[in-house]
Amino acid sequence: MLNFSYFAPTKVVFGKGAEVETANLLKEFGAKRVLVHYGTGSVVKSGLLDKITECLEDAGIYYVKLGGAVPNPRLSLVYEGIKLAKEEKIDFILAVGGGSAIDSAKGIGYGVANDGDVWDFYEGKRKAKACLPVGVVLTLSATGSEMSSSSVITKEEGWLKRGYNSDLSRPKFAVMNPELTMTLPDYQTACGCADICMHTMERYFTNNPGLDLTDALAEGLLKTVMKNALILVKDPKNYDARAEVMWAGSLSHNGLTGLGNDGGDWMTHKMEHEIGGLFDVAHGAGLAAIWGSWARYVYKECLPRFKKYAVNVMGIENKGTDEEIAIKGIEATEDFFRKIKMPTNLNELGIKATDEDLHTMARKCAEGVGGAKGAAKLLKEEDMYRIYKASAGE
Ligand code: NZQ
Ligand code: ZN
């Protein structure tokens, strides 16, 4: 087991009706002037935003609202939020929504608490010294941003989608009522389940020999998400299935399922970020579309882990060569994606990428990771291009 530090400071309030605790939580964390940040309308339509702002008014907490965080949230809105927050002397940001609203809130938090251009952090030019405190009312189980250190923002100029990780932005609290996810379109529910699986798979597929507890947590989480994702395909209003998925989403990306391992692979995510940047697709769908091509490209160099995954997570019989078992595990994962109506290649994702697009994504991805990355197999630009090409069916 490698050395690790684990920092999961987010206070979680989970269950039916949990959102009524929002004002109390804001007070607990000293919020006096709050920016309520949200997406493009789902929380307005569902009535959640009114419910939250009424709670704030009743509690005498000053707030201003800023909506408009689109999927793959944009840098221009982060700048707008920074300006507004400074004018209004905001001391706390409350994100109401999914990963995009949360990540945008974190971006605003960095921008207010540090001098200079906030994009510098996302470009890896310098590190943030502080972040305004962020709290979350979660409406979509997917990114784990409600407990994670990450924020992913897209800069419109050049369509660069880049992430910045710092413990400074881990939310102070996360309000999680699984009922709030029941208004989601089925497609978004499935995208979320794919993303949750992938956060743990990224940590699982490394060339470390493996760990009893961390692997058992990862495998248990993956089996839980897959089982309940299938239930939700048939029964989207199933509260318990939504609750299992919601809690798994937070644990999949707060560090727990990779402790003592070597930090993970993360190339499926990095490659998806280029797809999302260029074609503006839903993150979870983009991950599902690229994973199979990535897995087939790397599995031989990470065989013990692919075999263990096949047997322990996908229930493949431990019979035949290790390679045969690994491939069956990859096929079973793609079957799972199909069953929840997720794409397994770029065509199914609805993308008609030209060869130039594939090269562009590979180049930007390689630049974004500083040349090469990957723990299952170290990938360079040429490898990334081949994976994109395989996913494009060429
Ligand atoms: O914008 P609104 O109107 O709210 O609609 C959203 C959006 O269209 C809708 N939605 C959310 N909750 C809903 C709802 N519709 C009905 N009922 C509800 N309860 O769903 C759509 C997608 O929302 P979004 O927030 O974009 O999705 P998600 O949570 O998947 O976030 C995706 C973003 O997070 C990044 C992704 O790359 C992408 O940019 N990620 C962030 C991470 C992190 N911060 O830790 C890690 C991830 O790996 C990921 O990269
Ligand atoms: Zn993700």
Image: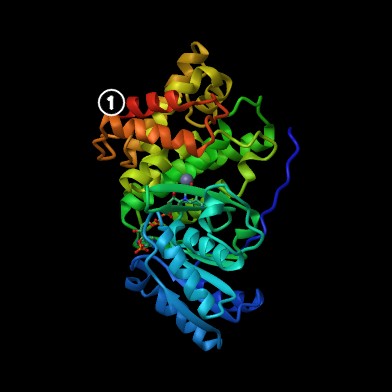
* Quadrant the C terminus occupies: top left
- In terms of image quadrants, where is residue 71? bottom left
Furthest-top residue in this view: 321
The reply to whether residue 338 is visible in this rendering is yes
Give the labeled residue for mark 1.
393
Residue lying at the far right in this picture: please name it: 3
Query: Could you tell me which quadrant the N terminus lies in?
Result: top right
Q: Residue at x 25, y 40 (%)?
A: 350
Q: Position of residue 263 (x, y in %)?
A: 63, 37
Neighbor class of circle 1 (other Cα within 10 Å; few <14, some 14-19, many 20+) is: few
Residue 341 spot, x, y in % from top left: 30, 41
Residue 132 falls in image quadrant: bottom right
Q: Image point 29% across, 31% down: which residue?
A: 356
Residue 77 position, x and y percent, is 41, 64
| Amino acid type, mark 1 | Gly
Point out residue 78 in the picture as x, y percentages from the top left corner.
46, 63
Left or right, 126 with respect to 355, comes to: right
Q: Secondary structure at mark 1?
A: loop
